[in-house]
Image (cartoon, rainbow, N blue to C red):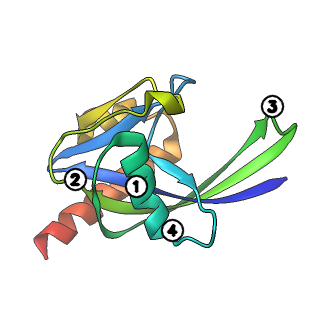
Amino acid sequence: MIMRICAGGVVFCGDYVFLLKNDKEEWVLPKGVIRDRRSSRDVAVDRVLKEAGIRATILTQAGETSYEFYSLTRHQPVCNKITWYVMEAPNTSYRIAFEQGFTDGDFFPIEQALEKITYTQDRELLACAYEKYKAALAE
């Protein structure tokens, strides 16, 4: 099994959060594989910028998730372990990276995003990250 260490961002702007739709019609959060000894924080900020065109800043760590899938191109199972960060966008402007296979994306109200997001663990992560986001703003 291939193990991949990744990082991503749960990007908020007020009571809205950014979601992307991938080529499998799944609503997901921006993330990417950590390479070249980069920090997870740098990769999270970079992937949010490259996948969504958002210059977000990290407020705090959101948590970790992991999942396994079978890679048809590699012909073997892959396990992604992702460190997530609570991030804040300066506004709701974005640019979807269609060239990376994303088909849609937007800032959604939290309740709508919780219904829309595809995976249960991402839904739980989003709910937890929103509480951490509100707490960070209250400080």
First in sequence: mark 2 vs mark 3: 3
- Which residue is identified by label 3? 72
Question: What is the three-letter code of the residue carrying label 4?
Answer: Ser
Rendered image: mark on residue 93? none
- Which residue is identified by label 2? 89
Residue 11: x, y in percent? 31, 51
Q: Residues within 10 Å of mark 1 (few under 14, many from 20)?
A: many
Q: Residues within 10 Å of mark 3 (few under 14, many from 20)?
A: few
Q: In this view, does 106 lie to the left or right of 98?
A: left
Task: Report helix, strand or loop for mark 1.
Answer: strand
Q: Is residue 66 left or right of residue 58?
A: right
Instruction: Check the image and report above or below for 107 versus 130.
Output: above
Question: What is the three-letter code of the residue carrying label 3?
Answer: Leu
Q: Residue at x 45, y 27 (%)?
A: 98
First in sequence: mark 3 vs mark 1: 1
Task: Report helix, strand or loop for mark 3.
Answer: loop
Residue 126: x, y in percent? 37, 50
First in sequence: mark 4 vs mark 1: 1
Quadrant of the rendered structure where residue 44 is? Answer: bottom left
